Image: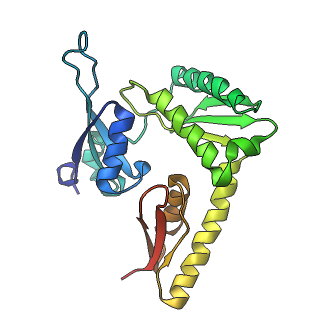
Amino acid sequence: MSMNTLKKKEITGKNISEARQKAAEAFGVDEDEIQIEVLENASSGFLGMGAKPCKIAAWLASDAEDVEIEDVKEVKTKSSKPTGNEKEEAVAFLEKVIPLMGVEAKITASCEEDALKVNLEGEKMGILIGRRGETLDALQYLTSIIVNKDKHDYVRVTLDTENYRQKRQDVLEKLANKIADKVIKNGRNMTLEPMNPFERRIIHAALQNHEYVTTSSVGEEPERRVVVSLKK
């Protein structure tokens, strides 16, 4: 598949984060399931006049997987490598927010190739994790907004504590395979309980190469669910 055959949409927003969110909604998928190219950066204009929104081209990441080798250079990755500036912004933000939650935490951040990774250590980490990781996800989302404000390239942020992400991933992968077995045995689709985007992505990834079942998402946030069904 060449680049010009990809189903692309042009989306505008106040900034990259908003445009990316709108693009995901337009495709009916989660944000991590799309790739983007920034066409025009947002500008405030002069004295409030001539302001322009951010404009991006967006397409499904699954479509981009089949792009021919000579076209790969034209496809921007979902996120760019973070720098020391983003690291400082993330730590400074969390140092202000976390104490307001009545929690003391040691914050360490590292700039990896694919994301800015932030880890929290201390007592009462359960408060920062929240029910099924909802509080941790909210903190991660807010940190991402701060880091990506007025930036040209999107920097992915992952926030973790007590290795919660990996532990949750292990549990969900086992659940995915257990549900797949039930679907095959009973011959009926199964809809899982509502999950956040992080958890849904794990289910999708765990079963994406399964021989007999496939997955899809239905519903609106925060009640969006994964459906596991037999392949036709």
Residue 3 sits above or below residue 121 on the image: below
Residue 94 in the image: x percent, y percent?
63, 28
Residue 14 in the image: x percent, y percent?
32, 30
Residue 41 sits above or below residue 113 on the image: above
Q: Is residue 165 left or right of residue 125?
A: left
Q: Which quadrant is home to the C terminus?
A: bottom left
> Which residue lies at the image location 38% right of the left edge and 24% below the top edge?
150
Residue 23 in the image: x percent, y percent?
31, 46
Q: Quadrant of residue 87?
A: top right
Residue 170 in the image: x percent, y percent?
66, 61
Q: Is residue 85 left or right of residue 132?
A: left
> Which residue lies at the image location 66% right of the left edge and 57% below the top edge?
168
Q: Is residue 71 left or right of residue 29?
A: left
Q: Which quadrant is home to the N terminus?
A: bottom left
Whether residue 158 is visible to the viewer of this picture, yes or no, is no
Q: Is residue 34 left or right of residue 193?
A: left
> Which residue lies at the image location 50% right of the left edge and 69% below the top edge?
207
Residues 194 and 171: in front is 194
Q: Quadrant of residue 138?
A: top right
Q: How is the image coloured?
A: rainbow
